[in-house]
Image: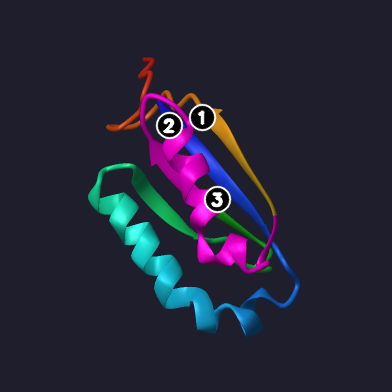
Amino acid sequence: MHYLLTYDLVDDYLERRAQYRDAHLALAWQAADRGELLLAGALESPIDAAALLFEGESPAAAEAFAKTDPYVVNGLVKAWCVRPWKTVVGKTASSPLR
């Protein structure tokens, strides 16, 4: 199953992220290396949100990531949410339909 972790970013995110970016990216790459995190990045125009796509049997990995992410812990994220995403089209869809 896929889970989408979304971040609602603070207005001064771009100005504040530099001091936490290396730790955030290290955490993200660790999750990717474990096969939990498939894709992640900030949404642009404007940069006010981010989306991280997780895969697993439950939302536990996405929730654990958010709770320890330096961006969340240090207040760069106003709010976050994990939602199941029933993907149906594409080579890696969790529930392919034709």
Q: Which residues are magenta?
A: 51-78
In front: label 2 or label 3: 3
Q: Which quarter of the picture shows residue 10?
A: bottom right
User: Mark 1 is on which residue type?
Assistant: Trp
- CA distance separating discs 2 and 3: 19 Å
- CA distance separating discs 3 and 1: 20 Å
User: Mark 2 is on which residue type?
Assistant: His
Q: Residue at x 35, y 67 (%)?
A: 26
Magenta stretch encompasses residue 60: yes
- Residue 56 horizontal side relative to residue 64, left or right: left
Place of residue 65 in the rendered image (x, y in percent of width and height, measured from the top left): 47, 49
User: Mark 3 is on which residue type?
Assistant: Lys
Identify the residue under disc 1.
85
Q: Are marks 2 and 3 in contact (CB under 8 Å)?
A: no
Q: Nearer the viewer, residue 81 or 47?
A: 81
Q: Are marks 3 and 1 in contact (CB under 8 Å)?
A: no
Q: Nearer the viewer, residue 60 or 53?
A: 60
